[in-house]
Image (cartoon, rainbow, N blue to C red):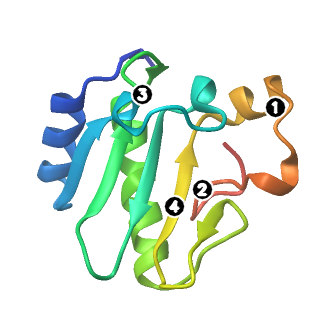
Amino acid sequence: MAESILSVDSIRKSLQEAGFDVLVRSLAQLGPIENSEILCAALFCSRRERHQLFVNTRMDCDHLHLTKDVGDLIGAYDRDQLDRGWNRKPNGDASTGICTQSAAIRTGLNPQRWAFGPNRRSG
């Protein structure tokens, strides 16, 4: 599967075509965040506002895989089936980072801090 550098516009278009209303921006707009060097994207979900996806435009990730992952993660949030890979806020909002399994392992990310995407048993 060929990979290519992610662009905000291409991911926005891909998510719209898949039927998701997500505000898409560059990860750089968040400023410094933990583990940003391994993230393909960061997803912020809310019941009161549009979901937001921040794409790491410096990372070599697969567009189609990211679109499916975001769809699966939004579905899990909507069903309130969040795994240990999510950061939950008391108001019901939640966020999660999206990276490859190999990047998480390679950088030594604590396995208690990440999980396989919904609907998957492995990467």
Label 3 sits on residue: 56
Percent of width and height locating residue 44: 41, 59
- The tag on residue 93 is none
Three-letter amino acid code at disc 3?
Answer: Asn
Q: Are marks 3 and 4 in contact (CB under 8 Å)?
A: no
- Determine whether, in the image, residue 97 is placed left or right of residue 46: right
Q: Which residue is mark 1?
A: 105
Q: Residue furthest front?
A: 31
Counting residues from the start of the chain, the first of labels 4 and 2 encountered is 4
Alpha-carbon span between mark 4 and mark 2? 13 Å
Q: Which of label 4 and label 2 is nearer to you?
A: 4
Q: Is residue 102 above or below residue 92?
A: above
Q: Secondary structure at mark 2?
A: loop
Dot 2 amino acid type: Gly
Give the side of residue 66 with respect to residue 108, left or right: left
In the displayed structure, would residue 51 be above or below residue 43? below
Nearest-to-viewer mark from 1 and 3: 3
Q: Spatial distance from mark 1 to mark 3, Cα to Cα?
A: 19 Å
Q: Residue at x 51, y 61 (%)?
A: 95
Q: Which mark is residue 95?
A: 4
Q: Earlier in the sequence, mark 3 or mark 4?
A: 3
The residue singled out by tag 2 in the image is 117
What crowding class fits label 2: few (fewer than 14 Cα within 10 Å), some (14-19), or many (20 or more)? Answer: many
* Other-residue count near label 1 (Cα within 10 Å), few / some / many at <14 / 14–19 / ≥20: few
Spot occupied by residue 83 in the image (x, y as percentages of width and height): 67, 70
Mark 1–mark 2 distance (CA, rounded to whole Å)? 15 Å
Q: Residue at x 56, y 76 (%)?
A: 89
* Residue 33: % across, % down: 57, 37
- Mark earlier in primary sequence (1, 2): 1
Q: Amino acid at mark 4?
A: Ser
